[in-house]
Image (cartoon, helix red, strand yellow):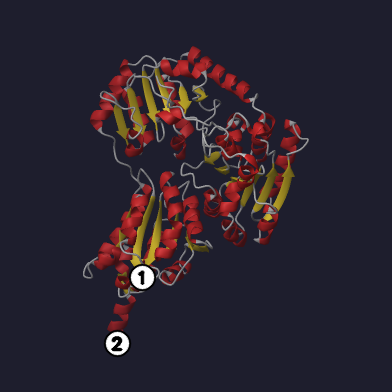
Amino acid sequence: MIMNMKNKYQSLMTVAAAIAKISEREGVSHAFAYPGTSELGLCSAIASSKVRLVNGRGDKESAFMAAGGSVLKAAKTVAILHGARGLSNALGALCDAQRNEVGFVNFVGLPSTSSAPFLPPHGERNLIENAARFVKAGVDVSSLSQERFPHEFVKNVRWAFETAKTFPRGPVLIGVPQDLLEKSCIPRAIIDAYEPSSDEQPFPDKKELCTAADLLKQSARPLILIDDIYFKHEGADKALKAFSEHLQAPVLQVFYRRGPMLFQSTFSRLVPLFAGRYDLSNKDDQGLLESADCIITLEDRNMYSRVIGGLPSCPKIAITSNEKMTRKNEYLHDGDCLLAGDPFQIMKLLSEAVEARPEDAQKKERCRRQMSAKDAANANIPLAWAGRAFASAIAAVFEKSPVLLIDDSQMFGGLLSRFYEYLPADIRVVGDHGAFIGGGLSFSTGAAIGNKDRRVVCFLGDQSFVNAVQGLVASGEQKAPITYVVCNNGKSVSLLTQSAVSPVPFTGSHGEDFLQNVNRLDYCTIAEALGVATIRVRLDKDVRDTSHAQKLFGEALRKADSADGPVLIELVMTSDPREWGGIWATSGNEKIMK
């Protein structure tokens, strides 16, 4: 009898141990947590598994790190959050990840079922249900039936991973009460039989696919308009080259000139029909768009009038993995098509349905001329010498090693984006559509810890650094292989630029002081105190030479790249808003309509 009871006991595992084992099966590499009592048992189970447990040293920091770890591969990392305290504190990070379509699972430790009705400090009514409004999805397993709990619980965890992986990707919450986490009720046989979730994407609507193919067959001058989200897909350049050349369609990309402005793009050397970013003030770009008799949008998220002006009235085909975010932009009308699903699969199906067109040398030459003209125009902005120097230094340092560049710098990113063609061809760039100033620091730390095959470089503005400094605690402790570049231009140049054209501008010394950096706040001293090595590069005085700036910045980057752990480079730049001219747009494009 004793032996039978022992065998029965051994056949069960705790819910926490089941989560740890499922995470292993799902290929999770790291779990980022800042625990409280509710999820302490889960952290213990994770620590005993093959998943590496990392103390994020903050709630939102842990969520950002888990997002960063999953940015190149969905659900590669997870976050463990503490009830109301942790989840509410991390909600901004989760919103940012949702906006940027980063898929990962967040396990939320809830109050024990016996105390939950009394709303202890870490409990709120309908916490998961309400928080799930800000992310892709969420589930609270508290109400699962006891009789079916083991099977239903495992089913819900699998659903969470699968939901995070499928388009449109995003964070998923799964709330588990403390007493359930610690309860031995999951038969090991269920976990042993667990099959990892699928990332298979839905097939596009066949009728819409046929309609789109017919539109392309009737089109003589198709044009492809892409958004940066497209480049989240591995192999995006190769697929874009094949699709554009099959259709002989020039390619333009959405041009963001407000907020964080450095996003992934492609290169004319990889996609010969790429004509650059669509500049509404550029007559050649306007002419190219207006001459199109069919526009194909790829992974549109923000092609509304304030960003891109109006689109011509010709037929349109929208290829997207996020139907809701594309439809909201209001350019699709009767007779147009929307194809939702895996963009690569849709592009391949359309190419199979439409006969390949002979190469048009004139189109390639026109695209080449437009790229050359844009490069010449960018050379006229005041800080062109610096932008060219920074991009060239990055290309030289990372010529033979792949780099993941994460931008959270606004003006600096906007400057660098003008010289994108100088960057290395295999670079991966992550910009931020969530506008969480400072989120990039912890996000990039998670990316560095979770993705060892790429060196990570994070660009930060000085305002971003101040809002994110807590993220350096875990970075220093974990010796994250990352380089932070803080552009210190002394003040919020972007806000001062915007204020100058506002009906209610900041005036006098009060406004100037309000938007200045904090006096006596030394970024390098703070970083060093948290275990992060530092390098200071001054380019604010007597430096206007590209080769000299490239040498200084390149030496700092190379030194940081060879370091054993995190390094912060403080890049001291001019604070004169006039020097930053030509980067920040102070108005939208609503009035520029076709």
Which corner quadrant of the image does residue 45 belong to? bottom left
Mark 2 belongs to which amino acid?
A: Ile
Residue 547, percent from left and from top: 74, 32
Q: Is residue 549 something that shows in the picture?
A: yes
CA–CA distance between discs 1 and 2? 34 Å
Q: Nearer the viewer, residue 338 or 326?
A: 326
- For image coordinates 34% across by 18% down, the residue present is 314
**Which numbered disc covers residue 111?**
1
* Residue 99, percent from left and from top: 42, 44
The N terminus lies in quadrant: bottom left
Q: Position of residue 170 (x, y in %)?
A: 39, 48
Which sits earlier in the primary sequence, circle 1 or circle 2? 2
Q: Which mark is residue 5?
A: none
Residue 533, placed above or below residue 289: below
Instruction: Give the structural element (helix, strand or loop) at label 2.
Output: helix
Residue in front for this viewpoint, 514 or 66: 514
Residue 195 visible, this orientation: no
Residue type, numbered disc 1: Pro
Residue where numbered disc 2 is placed: 2
